[in-house]
Image (cartoon, helix red, strand yellow):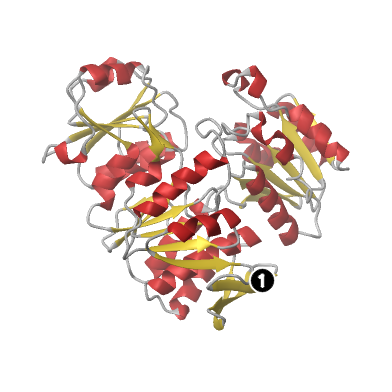
């Protein structure tokens, strides 16, 4: 049988590490880290395609397409199992028969990247990726040489991982489950000294039963923070504000309202930047200018400022970092502009994220017509758990296009989301909304509809049939 996942039982000398599910964003980044540390790294995956296949190829990491017993020959010293792998996967079955050491992705990250570091865990239903990237950049500009692992590609770094020689490691703390042999959330493995909690909402309907189930996971994270640690909490979120009362560490709150230690006020969206004043304990702290926009992103920014101040980073350094932050791939990312038509790509998929993203884009480009295309692709989006909530998420759009969700055969019939019903609900709210059976038909209709000065916002947590770039090429 395979050996225990106990980190204390790993052999002192490891040479060959094999990653199952290597083409996931986090797994590929971990593979890159291991390569930089000098290990022989191999991997396997059923879905080997760009951009992660190109990323791994550039690192000279061999990837086997498909899973099978032969992929574990010769025996690697350690196998890292991604959470895409099921217990019935043929490679996982072979792993269970062999006496090989294995770890989950979060365990491996703790062992290889967090050891000897102060862990800064960015958690919450929304805003983790932007907040993590911004904090990593602030620490970088302050000369602190942080390590980090982020669930998107920060444009300032051009990659989503860095080992770093400094004392701090910034990690995006995902509440999704760890592996088929560990159904607890990933963030429970990251031993936070400092944690940021941006928000708590129901999500991941495939693994969480209800909101209370989600809240219990975040309670477990809060309990992990040591007495000498710190929890930075969004007081605008009522659930967060309630849950942090149980923390045994110092709690510092931030908000866009007036009920927190830190506030962001006088938020003003300009043509090329957002201006904002920061208040600490009722006293003016600094004024900032940043390329990011939207109240949700200013809230994320404020949490990063609280953290930076706690680490002794002075306002001039902070101001320069915030001003030069280039954002994240697929977070309100400008894909291009042709014929006066601007195309944006965004990862939004939860109803709250969809609503806040549309609101932010409309505020930024208020004098232009906003066309939104949304693909219900996530495990929660393809379920009817959010069916009614999505109807109020598109109010700031001028025209909405919704395709048939992909992979619906994986969802029980009684739980399936209906794009057609959503379009009907949007029309009842006097919105111009249209349903399409597939992406190709939607692209054709979009090309016929668009006109100069339109802004097209395309939202999906998947590739959406490469719609943003296909649209740009066809314009």
Q: Which residue is drawn at 21% across and 23% down?
A: 2
Image height of 42 relative to 191, above or below? above
Residue 87 picture quarter: top left
Residue 118 picture quarter: bottom left
The image shows residue 439 at horizontal and vertical percentages of 69, 29
The total of numbered circles placed on residues is 1
Is residue 412 rendered to the left or right of residue 164? right
Q: For this rendering, which residue is in front, 343 or 247? A: 247
Q: For this rendering, which residue is in front, 316 or 107? A: 107
* Residue 48 in view, yes or no: yes
The image shows residue 259 at horizontal and vertical percentages of 60, 70
Image height of 363 relative to 173, above or below? below
Q: Residue at x 60, y 57 (%)?
A: 238
Q: What element carries label 1?
A: strand
Is residue 59 rendered to the left or right of residue 335? left
The image shows residue 221 at horizontal and vertical percentages of 40, 50
Residue 423 picture quarter: top right
Is residue 262 rendered to the left or right of residue 17? right
The image shows residue 336 at horizontal and vertical percentages of 65, 50
Quarter holding the C terminus is: top right
Q: Residue tagged by mark 1?
A: 267
* Residue 149 in view, yes or no: no
Is residue 238 rendered to the left or right of residue 434? left
Q: For this rendering, which residue is in front, 186 or 211? A: 211
Pick out the residue farthest to the front: 246
Q: For this rendering, which residue is in front, 306 or 76? A: 306
């Amino acid at each position: 049988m395979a050996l225990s996942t106990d980190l204390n039982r790993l052999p002192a000398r490891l040479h060959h590490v094999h990653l199952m599910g290597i083409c996931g964003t986090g797994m590929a980044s971990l593979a890159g880290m291991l390569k930089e540390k000098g290990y022989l790294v191999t991997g396997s995956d059923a879905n080997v395609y760009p951009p992660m296949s190109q990323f791994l190829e550039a690192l000279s990491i061999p990837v086997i397409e498909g899973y099978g017993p032969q992929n574990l020959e010769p025996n690697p010293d350690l196998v890292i199992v991604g959470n895409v792998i099921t217990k019935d996967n043929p490679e996982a079955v072979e792993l269970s028969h062999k006496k090989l050491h294995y770890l989950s992705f979060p365990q491996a990250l703790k062992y290889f990247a967090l050891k000897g570091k102060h862990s800064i865990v960015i958690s919450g239903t929304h805003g983790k990726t932007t907040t993590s990237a911004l904090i990593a950049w602030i620490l970088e500009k302050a000369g602190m040489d942080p390590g980090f692992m982020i669930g998107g590609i920060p444009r300032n770094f051009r990659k989503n991982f860095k080992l770093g020689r400094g004392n701090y490691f910034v990690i995006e703390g995902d509440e999704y489950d760890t592996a088929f042999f560990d159904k607890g959330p990933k963030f429970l493995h990251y031993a936070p000294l400092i944690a940021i909690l941006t928000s708590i909402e129901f999500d991941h309907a495939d693994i969480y039963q209800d909101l209370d189930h989600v809240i219990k996971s975040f309670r477990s994270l809060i309990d992990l923070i040591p007495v000498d640690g710190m929890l930075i909490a969004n007081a605008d979120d009522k659930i967060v504000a309630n849950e942090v009362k149980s923390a045994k560490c110092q709690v510092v709150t931030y908000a866009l309202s007036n009920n927190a230690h830190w506030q962001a006020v006088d938020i003003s969206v300009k043509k090329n930047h957002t201006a904002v004043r920061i208040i600490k304990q009722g006293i003016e702290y600094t004024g900032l200018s940043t390329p990011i926009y939207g109240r949700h992103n200013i809230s994320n920014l404020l949490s990063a400022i609280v953290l930076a101040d706690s680490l002794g980073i002075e306002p001039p350094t902070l101001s320069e970092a915030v001003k030069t932050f280039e954002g994240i791939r697929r977070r309100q990312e400008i894909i291009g502009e042709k014929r006066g038509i601007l195309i944006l790509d965004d990862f939004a998929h939860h109803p709250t994220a969809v609503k806040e993203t549309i609101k932010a884009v409309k505020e930024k480009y208020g004098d232009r017509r906003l066309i939104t295309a949304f693909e219900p692709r996530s495990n929660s989006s393809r379920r009817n758990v959010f069916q009614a909530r999505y109807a109020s998420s598109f109010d700031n759009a001028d025209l909405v296009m919704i395709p048939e969700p992909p992979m619906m055969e994986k969802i029980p019939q009684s739980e399936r989301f209906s794009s057609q019903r959503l379009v009907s609900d949007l029309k009842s709210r006097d919105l111009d909304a249209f349903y399409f059976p597939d992406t190709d038909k939607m692209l054709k209709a979009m090309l016929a509809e668009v006109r100069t000065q339109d802004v097209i916002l395309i939202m999906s947590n998947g590739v959406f049939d490469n719609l943003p770039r296909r649209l740009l090429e066809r314009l």
